[in-house]
Image (spheres, grey):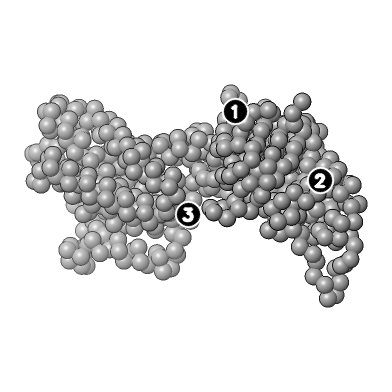
Amino acid sequence: MTEIIHLAVIGLIVGSIIGLGAMGLTLTYGILRFANFAHADLMTLGMYLAFFVVGDLGLAGAAIGPFSFGWGMIPAALFAIAGVALFAVGSDRVVFRPLRERGSGFLTLAVASLGIGIMLRAAIQMIWGPAQRRYTTGIHEAWTLFADVKIKPDQLLIIALTAASAVVLYLLLYRTRLGTAMRATSDNPQLAEASGIDTERIRLATWVVAGGLIAVAGIMFALQSQLRFNAGFEFMLLPMFAAVIVGGIGNPWGALAGGLLVGVSQEVSTEWIDTGFKPAIPFVILIATLIVRPRGLFGSTI
Amino acid sequence: MSALLEVRGASSGYGSVTIVHDVSLSLDRGELVTVIGPNGAGKSTLLKAIFGLLPITAGSVRLDGSEVTHAAPSRMVGLGMSFVPQTDNVFPSLTIRENLEMGGYRRRGDVGERLLEVLSLFPELKRRPGDTASKLSGGQRQALAIGRALMLDPAVLLLDEPTAALSPARRGEIFERLLAVRAEGVGLLIVEQNAREALAISDRGYLIVDGRNAHEAPGPAMLENPEVGRMFLGLEEPRYGDDASPPAGAP
């Protein structure tokens, strides 16, 4: 039983990362109306942009309390958030917006995002190489929750940051004029435009928010695991899409819940199945959702 | 002095298919003008083209003396024109209050005062402003759609079949509200299938047939025109009978 609880805690950490990434993915899905397959590579970009500051520039700084990283991670995270948001906005201006103006549909935009993802992945490999990297090395003490269930301070931070990000996103969407306009644009972009809402500005804001969320998720992933040029694409793309669909497309809270469900399920499953089959779990959840409840567990709306 | 809204020889359609041919109409401040015609005559296309949702391929649109022929809807809204589509005219997941706030998105400063003014026109929306629009009845939803469009104090309000699919009682309520809006000095251009009720309260009416101007007259006079009546209003033969289907466009 202790082992299952231990796996569930790991699942909660992995699920937090998936959920945080999926919240951004579902926002772009709901407001920009296409499946952004480059989202996982934006996650990789985020983790490497932070590495640029703490690794390449050597600005790791002194360690922060019990965490594995130093004070340099704070400006590194801000740099990563700004960099990914900028890249996302740039890709919209250069690729997605011209396609939208031509009246391109869901499939064209999704395939274009696949291309952006491939280019981004290749660029990251060219710049930082194929080798695995870490923000810091060394052994970091884990805290005992109870019995043999342990958790590292970094992992607790991951859960706390995901919860904090969800609260901030909620406040943005439900307590600000911009957030209401984002929900309105998600509901009906034509009517939003006819109401005088600058929907192009709303789309840009969506890219910034989604880019920021996925950059943080990327750093969390690297803290929990390690950096690799294809980390996002290989390990996070499918779980994030599964989370989005399980939670209901366009519903950030559903995506977060979906992420936690996928994370916990795939980790706990290793109690009974070989770890090598773990990546199949999001597929199973995805297919089961599409058959039983195609609109997701929580419905498709922000 | 030029009319508030002046459409001259406008043509429009979808892609290479022209639906509206050389249509002209005008609208003044505080005037209620109804466009009637059979199904497929191009009435809704005309409204969408005026608002900039469809391209105008020939002719011109002037709003308060300014040329706005090819202006996008977002610019039209800024210039004082609002549009209420026939369907999908509210944000279903937003509350009543949020729907109205989004209608006033471009307002500078506090929208609260205008929100109260609009709510006073539609008391049924006042009771539960926190309800989401998806829970509203057809009549309430239409009231919200009109309220949303009024949030920016438009000079011109275009309405595409505002009473479609409503019961006679609800239709009457909506027409009453439109008269109240007109009393505020707003120019209303309405496309209506419930032609008799709409023309009865209209200052003027336009009959559009096959995408072209067919007739123009004061609203009540249009009702009395036997030709218009026979063809589109069901006032004369053929009557709705056991073996006769209603004429196209009849209420």
Q: Residue at x 80, y 49 (%)?
A: B215
How far is the residue under mark 1 from the one under mark 2?
Answer: 36 Å
Mark 3 closeness class: few <14, some 14–19, many ≥20 residues within 10 Å: many
Q: Residue at x 35, y 63 (%)?
A: A286
- Same chain? Circles 1 and 2: yes
Task: Give the letter of the chain under mark 1.
Answer: B
- x and y percent of residue B189 in the render? 73, 42
Task: Name the residue type under label 1.
Answer: Arg
Numbered disc in front, either 3 or 2: 2
Task: Name the residue type under label 3.
Answer: Ser
**Residue indicated by mark 2:** B216
- x and y percent of residue A57 in the render? 13, 28
Residue B85 seen in the current view: no
How far is the residue under mark 3 from the one under mark 2?
Answer: 47 Å
Q: Quadrant of the N terminus of chain A?
A: bottom left
**Residue indicated by mark 3:** A300
Residue B107's disc number:
1
Residue B37 seen in the current view: yes
- x and y percent of residue A275 in the render? 17, 62
